[in-house]
Each structure stands twice: as structure tokens, then as C-alpha cells.
Amino acid sequence: MQLLNRIGRYLVAGTLLDHIAKGFIKLRKRIDYLLGIWARKLLFSKCEVVNNRIFIMTYDFQYSCNPAAIAAELIRRELPVEIYWAVKKESNLEEFPPEIKTVPYRSYTMYQVQATAKIWIDNAFNCIWDDMPKKKTQYYFNTWHGSMGIKRLTSNSNKLWLHRSKRANKRTDFMISNSQFENDVYTGTFWPNVPTLLYGHPRNDMLFHPEAFSAYRREICQLFDISVDDRIMLYAPTFRDDGDLSCFDVDYAALKQTLEQRFGGNWVIFVRLHYKNRKRDETFDKPWLKDGGIIPDMQKLLAVADAGITDYSSWAYDYLLTRRPLFLYAPDLEKYDSDRGFYYPLETTPFPVSKSNEQLQQSILNLDTEKYLKNCEAFLKEKGCVEDGHAAQRVVDQIVKQMGL
């Protein structure tokens, strides 16, 4: 009787029906996923590999990050290759060079191209996400998307992500690294048996060519209708797995005033939230406050920014190569460290760490430039960084070798 009463209460509340419905949806998704794997193996396992074909996919489906720099080098050399790039509806197709052919994500065409491409290029787990069959004559280059990043990879709370990442060691042929530190992270996580190519990160090559900075600055300033003489502060925090964005509470007005007091000039603040958190409503109602999220390639912003603020994002360790001032604003430091974890303490970086707006303002006002530069050099040396502005050339040399061109 008690069991019947309990079932009755569940039915009235809709709880039992909800659980059954969710169970069926979960089961259906699992069946669809397994059927998809079976279909791809049946359709594409025997496809002949096209020796000069390259397939690229980035985690944001934009022309960005390390794969974009590699593609640009391939195009610059005018090599006889076919370059295909997986895109979604929200991808900014105007950013893609005409030499690149875009294919819709998870379309038949995409899978066909991936099945026949001699080279796969990726900056996450994209190419193995759908368990696409990979032939022995295909080569998978993973560039990842961080530089000496402080966040632990293995602490990702997404179980599906962790499950699918287990394929990485078996499928990947080369990991692209910019430091001995990254080598150790790769071999200590998902790629213990994968060769690491200590080449540097192609996306950082532009940071070693200051002659191009003025062109990037003119492009950015024209787009945002600001003067080329304005100084730019880039604030770009990383995402939060739990969706709590209360830590993104920078006092922009006070920040602008502090920057102008410390460094002089007229400062414009660019706010670029991580793409996972970009749905958050952000009001850009001041002429000196801009939405940096409309720029697909963040490296352009790094090239023109006169200073930066982040929390735990790996772009800090790209920006470090410019030796310009960068500050860490981390009001949720203890929580983030507990949830995700760090490879090394935040305080061991060259960057001043603040947990409140008041501390951030004091860090800016009290910046010792000479000490900061000395700490930057020591950090790069300690991590075994090899960046020199020629990473894309080295990666393309390896691609050419594998293709036999």
C-alpha cells in the first residue's frame, strides 16, 4: 500500500513521468550516438586518403587560434593543398581566406572530408569527439589552445568530455608544445605516448612582429571608432563551469581612472568574455567601454592591447611574450582552485594578483616595471619556453614532411 501511495504521489507531481521521459531521451541519444559511430565506420572506413587534403576544426568553429596561423602559413607558401574547415551557423565566414573551403559541422560532407584528409589539425578534442575512424595513413596534429596554462586539464567536471578525451592518446600523432612545462602537462594527462613537437605556438608568432602591430591597431580602432592614440586595456576572464559569473565584477570606471593616473593617456577598456559565458548581458554604454567579443581572433587584441587583466585564462601566458603589464583579478581564487585546481600557485607568476577592485587599483598604481620585466624573464626560463615567432613555419614543415610534398 505504501508503494502504491508513493507511486500515486509521483504521478500527481509528475516526478515519475519526468524521470521516465528523461530516461528515454538519454537512451535515445545514446542509441543515436552509437548508430552514428557505426554508420561512419561503415561509410568512411574504406575511403581513400587524399594526400594533399587538410581538415581543420577549432573548438569555437572560427578562423582563430593556432590552426588559423598554420593555415595562413600554408597559404603564404602557396602549397598545393586543399584546406577544409568545419563551421557552424554562427561562424564568421568573412574571416576565412578564400583559399579555405568551409564545410558544415557534422554534415555528411564534413565527415567525408575528415575521412579522406591526410592531415587533421585541431586545438581541442574536436577531431575525436564523434569517434571518427582514423586510418594509419592519416596524421592528427593537436595544437591545443593554451600556453603554459595554469588550469589543470584533468579536473574538467564534464564527464562526457573526460570520457571522449580518453581517445586522445590513441588517435593523436603529434602535440604542438611551446615549453618543457607543456610537454610535461601533455604526457602527464591525455597524451602519455604521443610525441610532442617543441615548436612554439603558431598563434603567438604575430606577437614577435611589432612591425605589423600598427596595422592591427588601425583595424581595431576603425572597427570600434576610437583613436589610434587611445590606449587599450583588455579584460578577458576565463569561463566558469558552474555558470556563476558574479566574480566578473570589475569596476570599469574606477579602472579607467586608475590606468590614466598610473600610465597617462586616454584609456579604452575592451571586455571579452569567454565564448561559453558570452550570453551574459553586458552593457557597453560608455564610449570607452567596448565589446571585445566581436573579434574572433583574440591574438589581434593581444597584439594591440597596452595592458591586460584576466584571472586564470591561458592567454596571460601568450601576452607575457609582449612583456606588457598584465594583472590577475581573481575574487574567487580559493573556490576555483578547489573546484578546478592549478599546476602552480598563482602567486608564482609575474603578474600581480588581486581579489577585490580596491586591490586591483593598488596593483596598477604600485606596478614596479623593472621588477615585473625581470620576473617575466625568470618565468619564461623556468617553464622552458621556446617561443621565437617561427612556430607556424616549423609546424608546416612537419605537415609537408608527412604529406611528402
Image (cartoon, rainbow, N blue to C red):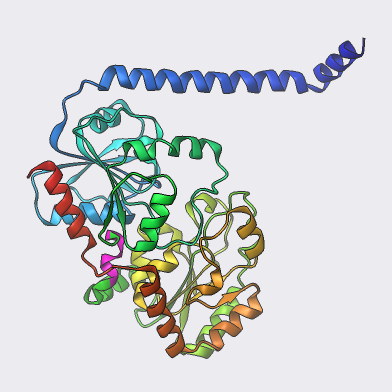
Quarter residue 126 falls in: top left
**In the picture provided, is 341 more to the left or to the right than 387?**
right
Q: Quadrant of residue 4?
A: top right
Q: Residue at x 39, y 70 (%)?
A: 319
Q: Residue at x 40, y 47 (%)?
A: 60
Q: Is residue 275 above or below residue 108?
A: below
The vertical placement of 285 against 26, above or below, is below
Q: Position of residue 24 (x, y in %)?
A: 61, 18
Instruction: Name the residue: 22% across, 31% down.
Output: 136
Q: Is residue 366 left or right of residue 95?
A: right
- Image location of residue 36, percent across then percent down: 40, 21
Answer yes or no: is residue 88 visible.
no
Residue 53 in the image: state x and y as whole percent: 16, 38
Span colored in magenta: 202-207
| Residue placed most toward the observer, 233 or 39 | 39
| Residue drawn at 86 percent across, 19 percent down | 9
